Amino acid sequence: MRVAIAEDSGIFRQALVTLLATAGTDVIASAPTGDELITRISSDPPDVVLLDLHMPPTYTNEGVLAARHIKQAHPGVGVLVLSAYNETPQAMALFGDRAQGLGYLLKDHVTDVDNLRSALERVHRGETVIDPLVVARLVDSRQRGNDLHALSDREKDVLALMAEGHSNVGIGRRLHLSHRTVEDHVRAIFTKLGINDTRESDRRGQDNKRVLAVLAWLRSTQPT
């Protein structure tokens, strides 16, 4: 897997390069800004781009803007955005209407090389990766209202893992539930939230559709 990195902190950028190198990942380019990285990969795009959320010149949403540009220019490139803080509006802005091959993680959760490589591999496959703490805040904000009142505690657990991009098998392993039980919970969640769970033969496509449905529901219920 070929990876390119944009991170304004030289120390953290080098740490990422070293961390990925130890996992056998080929870092083909690294830069302090999104614009510079976009230029460097224009003729030779990597498999995945790793972007800091806050970079020069404004240190606000440069990572989101760079991610959008890269996905438009190179649709097959996975993009993983890193942030030092749990900024759910930025996360929702990143995913927009299409979440395939995109991820948003907190920097505290990328120091484990296995977790980082797993996240990069998932966005490379076209999956969606959302930091568990980001999902938890989104779900918790809905729990404070009436939107999730119909869900059981176990269904809320399943919903959070669905929003992180886990398949039914992955959810079952994490919650120690049978595959049939997870399927029952998923059907109940979609029914209670009024989301149409259209089945597809392609498993990856179905997983992405499930995540997109959850993201769409979360986005539609954000306070105005």
Image: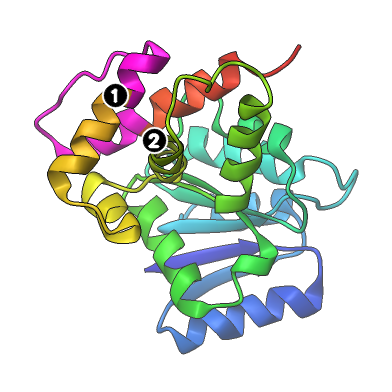
Point out which mark residue 155 bears. Answer: 2
For the residue marked with disc 2, what is the amino acid?
Glu
State the residue at coordinates (73%, 48%): 86
Percent from the top left, x then y, of residue 201? Answer: 9, 31
Q: Nearer the viewer, residue 153 or 35?
A: 153
Q: Is residue 28 magenta?
A: no
Q: Are marks 2 and 1 in contact (CB under 8 Å)?
A: yes
Image position of 155 with respect to 51: above or below: above
Image position of 127 with respect to 50: above or below: above
Point out which mark residue 103 bears. Answer: none
Q: Would you name the residue on which mark 1 appears?
A: 188
State the residue at coordinates (56%, 25%): 96
The N terminus lies in which quarter of the figure? bottom left
Q: Nearer the viewer, residue 172 or 42?
A: 172
Q: Which residues are magenta?
A: 189-210
Within the image, what quadrant is residue 152 found in?
Answer: top left
